[in-house]
Image (cartoon, rainbow, N blue to C red):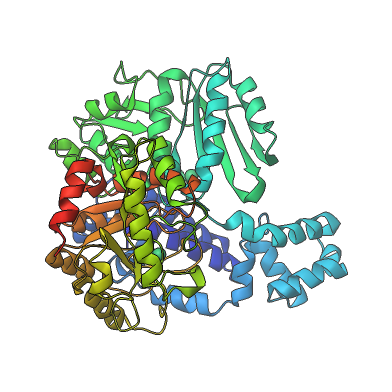
Amino acid sequence: MEVREIADRLEEIGTLLELTGENPFKVRAYQSGARALESLEEDLDVLIEEDRLGEVKGIGKALTEKIISLRQTGKLEFYDKLRKSIPDGLVEMLEIPGFGPKKIRKVHEELGIETMEELKAACESGRIAELPGFGKKSAENILSGIANRIAYGKRHLWWDVRSVALPILEGLRELEAVDRAEVAGSFRRSMETVGDLDFIVASSKPEPVMKWFTGQSNVVEVTARGETKSSVRFEGGLQADLRVVPDDRFVFALHHFTGSKDHNVKMRQRALARGLSLSEWGIFNKGEEPESGKAYDRPLARKGIKEEADLFKVLELDFIAPEMREGLDELELAEEGQLPRLVQFEDLQGTFHNHTKASDGHNTLEDMARAAAGMGLAYIGIADHSKASFQANGLDADRLLEQVERIAEINSQDGDKARLFAGCEVDILKDGTLDFGREVTSKLDYCVISVHASMSGLSEEEMTSRMIRAIEADTGCLKILGHPTGRLLLRREGYAVNIRKLIEAAAANGVLIELNANPWRMDMDWRHWRQAAEAGVPCVITPDAHSVENLEYLRCGVQAARKAGLTAEQVFNTLSLDRITEYLNNAKS
Ligand code: DGT
Ligand code: CA
Ligand code: CA
Ligand code: ZN
């Protein structure tokens, strides 16, 4: 287990113990253990190896063994037993805002309540209001908490969050009192889903900034309001934090709240090795850090840190793009000058995998070609569904070949349109054969091959060999493997498949892999692209557009490619129209 996960587990144990009525000292031991782990300044494995973990403040003898077990096996019998001893309903109730372990235990002990339904009924019947220490107001709060629990607790798609975040950023920057403003957190790191938004503002007049932020018309609740920090909730449950800091501390706050935690831990360790202490408050000589509360009265140990790049420079690192700050090997790469030059939206010359009215899209070939040109793209590949996807009005061979002719016709006209490539999103059938044989696909410029049906019930081995069979199929044209895991973020897990083997098979067969930039998909996931790049498999960023508006999804696809560390050279659709045409022709047989 990662250190952060171990800390979360200890925190959870503390909460569960509280739920069982365990004595407060024991509960606190787990909570401070979790905090000690989060701010650990040495390598956990070294501490374990040198038998010094028990010496860390906040981690006693009992915790040491549990941490070692979690680190080395990912398991802890004590936790498993504890969790099993508590009814699921009580654990679920922890998600209700303001309804903590002590209160949950009370309703459990006094009223025998074990499920969410029972809790709801007890609120409605007035039994909760009658409990000492509760009252009518608490019963109402619990009820609305139950109703909102799902919306508030959940994460949000990066793309949806973007449409909330960008106007706020613009609004903040327009304020007289604001010197600088940025979004930090997982949004800035381009995670595929975002828990909450984190805004950082440089200003010497926090009051009007707070007022504007909490007074926005789409705010449904102000959940916290302080002098320099406030939190709000929007419709749909998304929350946003705002922190206002002095301009000379902006870089430190921005870097800290961009995270990730793991990246921050590594940065702090690197600073310490240079006798410096790095935090959200600034950079100080070791031993001269401010106590929290009077954070800004200590002078910084280094002057002239105006931008994040300056901060990295002090630590003898190249600038690390936010997307790459996940605590993987980005510091090592930055130290050696080996960070990739990440692909940018402007590098894209065209795209593939788009639908039209012919299957389940909303626009015509001409609409799509014109919209692509409007975005500055030189070419756009069409890939309507094949006949097996009948629910999506998939095309049979006749309709598809008609479309190929129509595309040639449109391409022969001059004008305001991007060059169309004729493709098809050909279904991978249950046995791994393709929905169209070579006699049809060889008439295309390329095809996307995707799984759309028979996703459940197959073992990982079966799904993997099914897809490899399709990767090896003779289509007579270039193949692009479509949305390789079939996942829908926040809705359904991808099917079980061995990605490593798919990448190897793609490399061996000259097949490209898609980064499907539909915000629900983001498939293949950024975590697998380095392996694909090392195997020499190009990435194709596609919007899987079903309308002209959806072409914009390319933007989140580029963010995911950046997060994966991909350069323009590793992304197929950064090639010019001429080079792409040549490539597609060479792939024909
Ligand atoms: P999210 O909102 O769940 O999608 O993920 P983040 O990464 O935006 O996390 P969030 O909003 O809790 O905090 C923003 C950043 O602030 C996080 O990436 C790192 C930093 N941060 C927050 N809490 C801690 C902490 O307890 N320790 C450390 N080292 N960093 C923290
Ligand atoms: Ca966040
Ligand atoms: Ca936050
Ligand atoms: Zn598809």
**Where ligand 4 lies, by quadrant?**
bottom left
Residue plotted at (57% across, 76% down): 86
What is the total number of numbered labels drawn onto the structure image? 0
To which quarter of the image does residue 299 belong?
A: top left
Is residue 324 among what the camera can see?
no
Where residue 22 appears, as percent x and y from the top left, is: 57, 68
Where residue 278 appears, as percent x and y from the top left, is: 33, 32
Where residue 255 appears, as percent x and y from the top left, is: 37, 33
Above or below, comparing residue 57 to residue 331 in the picture:
below
Who is closer to the viewer here, 263 or 131? 263
| Quadrant of the rendering where the N terminus is positioned | bottom left
Where residue 571 appears, as percent x and y from the top left, is: 23, 47
Residue plotted at (74% across, 60% down): 142
Above or below, comparing residue 513 to residue 393 in the picture:
above
| Quadrant of the rendering where the C terminus is positioned | bottom left
To which quarter of the image does residue 120 belong?
A: bottom right
Who is closer to the viewer here, 468 or 447? 447
Who is closer to the viewer here, 67 or 252? 252
Q: Is 169 on the left or on the right of 562, as rendered?
A: right
Above or below, comparing residue 176 to residue 38 in the picture:
above
Is residue 202 among what the camera can see?
yes
